[in-house]
Image (cartoon, rainbow, N blue to C red):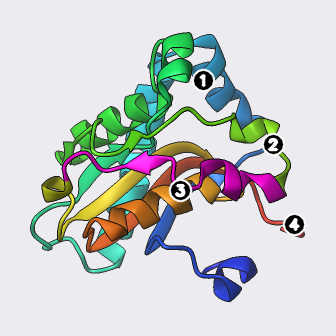
Amino acid sequence: MPCAICQLLPPPYDAAVTLADYRPPRDALVLALKFRGTLALASWLGRQLADAVGAHWRVQGLACAQPLPLIAPIPLGPRRLAQRGFNQSWEIARAMAARLAWSADPTLLARRHDTSAQSGLPLVDRHANIAGAFVVPRADRVARRHIVLVDDVMTTGATLAEASATLKRHGAARVTVAVVLRTPAPGE
């Protein structure tokens, strides 16, 4: 069931699948992957997220849908990718694709420009920071497809909303966001 905020202001994606809330001790897994380069965690997290997405897929009655969904990560900007040396969302997405036997495309979305880190911004500035940040280099890969958009953490949902809206503008039939952890809404 959607949270109260999503009921009032529906996001541009069609569904969201998460493993857990962003709280100790689970947050340490994402932090170790993202900031300490513990890439083995991406494979494990990707398999766990694949199982959750697969279960969602079956419950929604989409198991026989064709073509199968296309998995894509939230892209990093060139500067952040160079600093980190890898895109944690792509590492998770790769493991998901292997587990589900679905296709994945790390270039389905691209960053138009570098943006400030969302984590360093007040909540009210996050949508403005990410507005217009994404492009779809090949719209033919998106048109009429179900896209599973992968990220490590959903805080306000601004990044996933902007990326989903971009995919929908380029013809995506459906967008499901799949995130490892989500920050619970106030009061949860």
* Label disc, if present, on residue 160 of the rendered structure: 3
Name the N-terminal-most of marks 2 and 4.
2
Kindly state the secondary structure of the residue where label 1 is placed. Answer: helix
Q: Are marks 1 and 4 in contact (CB under 8 Å)?
A: no
Q: Which residues are magenta?
A: 124-138
Q: Check the picture and name the quadrant holding the C terminus.
A: bottom right
> What crowding class fits label 1: few (fewer than 14 Cα within 10 Å), some (14-19), or many (20 or more)?
some
Q: Nearer the viewer, mark 1 or mark 3?
A: 3
> What crowding class fits label 4: few (fewer than 14 Cα within 10 Å), some (14-19), or many (20 or more)?
few
Name the N-terminal-most of marks 1 and 3.
1
Instruction: Identify the residue at horizontal 29%, vertical 35% (top origin).
Output: 106
* Label disc, if present, on residue 137 of the rendered structure: none
Kindly state the secondary structure of the residue where label 4 is placed. Answer: loop
The residue that label 4 is drawn on is 186
The residue that label 1 is drawn on is 34
Distance in Å between CA atoms under marks 3 and 2: 16 Å
Residue 118 pos. (x, y %):
71, 41
Q: Nearer the viewer, mark 2 or mark 4?
A: 2
Rendered image quadrant of residue 61: bottom left
Distance in Å between CA atoms under marks 4 and 3: 19 Å
Name the N-terminal-most of marks 3 and 2.
2
Residue type at tag 1: Lys
Residue type at tag 2: Leu
Q: Are marks 2 and 4 in contact (CB under 8 Å)?
A: no
Instruction: Identify the residue at horizontal 69%, vertical 34% (top origin).
Output: 117
Residue 100 horizontal side relative to residue 178, left or right: left
Q: Nearer the viewer, residue 130 or 156?
A: 130
Rendered image quadrant of residue 143: bottom left
Residue type at tag 3: Leu
* Label disc, if present, on residue 121 of the rendered structure: 2
Residue type at tag 4: Pro
